């Protein structure tokens, strides 16, 4: 059977797409279109009536009952109460919030339900998806320097806004090691640019960041440089949370994260907190979008106040 693939436009979503492609290839099925999706403003309102090309597979993104295959691990995945009440895990639909990445959840489930056995390349991909999506870096330094091939690919995907390369990367991930992919001409050139910007970004960081109690607020809309989202933890290891304002296409994006290297982290769920504003995410990280900067700054102020009081 031919399927259309919809995947979250980040490292875990792309890795999850690669796993599904490898799984289908083993069954003699195909993916005939690749469509990245993201949490743009007002998406939750439009999601029930979203126009998918069918039959479709949806991975690492909000639940939709029309999906032939669906996998996700975000705690905020169900936007409709009745969908959540009616949902039951089955062979082709699996909600797995205990997994570090959607990619690892898919491999576990497909193995149990279909006997799927990942290749060495897929196992390596899952390892890095777990690290990137759960921020399971050994240190803030590792997260900022990004020397390993898996982390280099994650850097490219975050720093390159051209979505057309996602399809090519998904296809290559099932047949080539990540170390070879990141050395391909276009990706290598983009990574070199990002590396050159990194030194300047570290110097410029103090101009776009401000400490507000236990929170570091970073406004990357004030700079053209790519600034690692772990820079604040590297330079200010004592903070509890990072709150970022960014551009995301035509929208403004608010990203909130807990410091993964700070001990005695509390039970506050960032994803659920941001779902109140139409966003979502995980226990330790989440995001929300708005069309105007004034709207996103208003939410930012409320989130910072809440985190300093209850975080």
Image: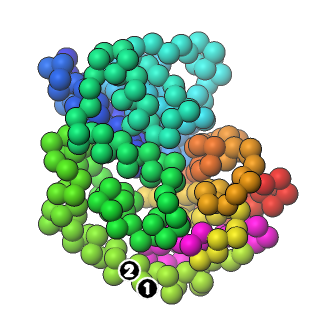
Q: Quadrant of residue 149?
A: bottom left
> Measuring 15% from the left and 42% from the top, which residue is drawn there?
175
Disc ID at residue 200: 1
Disc ID at residue 60: none
Asked if the stretch drawn in magenta spans residue 94, the answer is no
**Quadrant holding the C terminus:** bottom right
For the record, the magenta segment spans 212-234
**Residue that mark 2 sits on:** 197
Decide: few, some or many residues near mark 2? Use Cα within 10 Å; few <14, some 14-19, many ≥20: some
> Measuring 72% from the left and 75% from the top, which residue is drawn there?
211
31 in relation to 113, above or below = below
Asked if the stretch drawn in magenta spans residue 222, the answer is yes
Q: Farthest right residue?
A: 309
Image position of 272 (left or right of 91): right
Q: Position of residue 7 (x, y in %)?
A: 37, 38
**Quadrant holding the N terminus:** top left
Nearest to the observer: residue 258 or residue 128 = 128
> Measuring 38% from the left and 80% from the top, which residue is drawn there?
197
- Mark 2 in CB contact with mark 1 (< 8 angstroms): yes
Q: Is residue 46 visible?
A: no
């Amino acid at each position: 059977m031919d399927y259309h693939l919809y995947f979250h436009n980040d490292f875990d979503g792309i890795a999850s797409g690669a796993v599904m492609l490898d799984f289908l290839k083993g069954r003699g099925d195909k993916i005939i279109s690749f469509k990245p999706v993201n949490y743009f403003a007002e998406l939750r309102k439009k999601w029930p009536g979203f126009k998918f090309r069918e039959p479709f597979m949806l991975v690492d993104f909000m639940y939709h009952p029309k999906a032939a295959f669906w996998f996700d691990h975000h705690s905020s995945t169900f936007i409709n109460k009745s969908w959540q009440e009616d949902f039951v895990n089955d062979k082709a639909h699996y909600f797995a919030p205990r997994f570090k990445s959607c990619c690892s959840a898919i491999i576990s489930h497909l193995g149990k339900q279909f006997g799927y056995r990942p290749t060495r390349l897929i196992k390596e991909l899952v390892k890095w998806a777990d690290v990137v999506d759960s921020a399971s870096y050994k240190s803030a330094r590792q997260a900022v320097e990004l020397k390993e091939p898996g982390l280099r690919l994650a850097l490219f995907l975050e720093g390159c806004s051209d979505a057309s390369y996602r399809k090519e990367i998904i296809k290559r991930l099932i047949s080539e090691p990540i170390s070879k992919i990141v050395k391909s001409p276009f990706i290598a050139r983009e990574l070199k640019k990002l590396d050159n910007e990194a030194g300047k970004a570290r110097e410029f960081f103090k101009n776009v960041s401000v400490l507000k109690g236990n929170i570091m607020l970073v406004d990357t809309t004030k700079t053209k440089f790519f600034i690692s989202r772990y820079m604040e933890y590297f330079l200010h290891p004592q903070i509890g949370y990072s709150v970022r304002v960014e551009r995301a296409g035509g929208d403004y994006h608010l990203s909130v994260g807990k410091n993964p290297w700070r001990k005695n982290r509390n039970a506050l769920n960032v994803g659920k907190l941001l779902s109140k504003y139409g966003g979502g995410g995980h226990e330790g990280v989440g995001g929300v979008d708005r069309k105007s900067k004034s709207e996103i700054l208003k939410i930012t102020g409320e989130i910072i106040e809440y985190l300093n009081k209850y975080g």
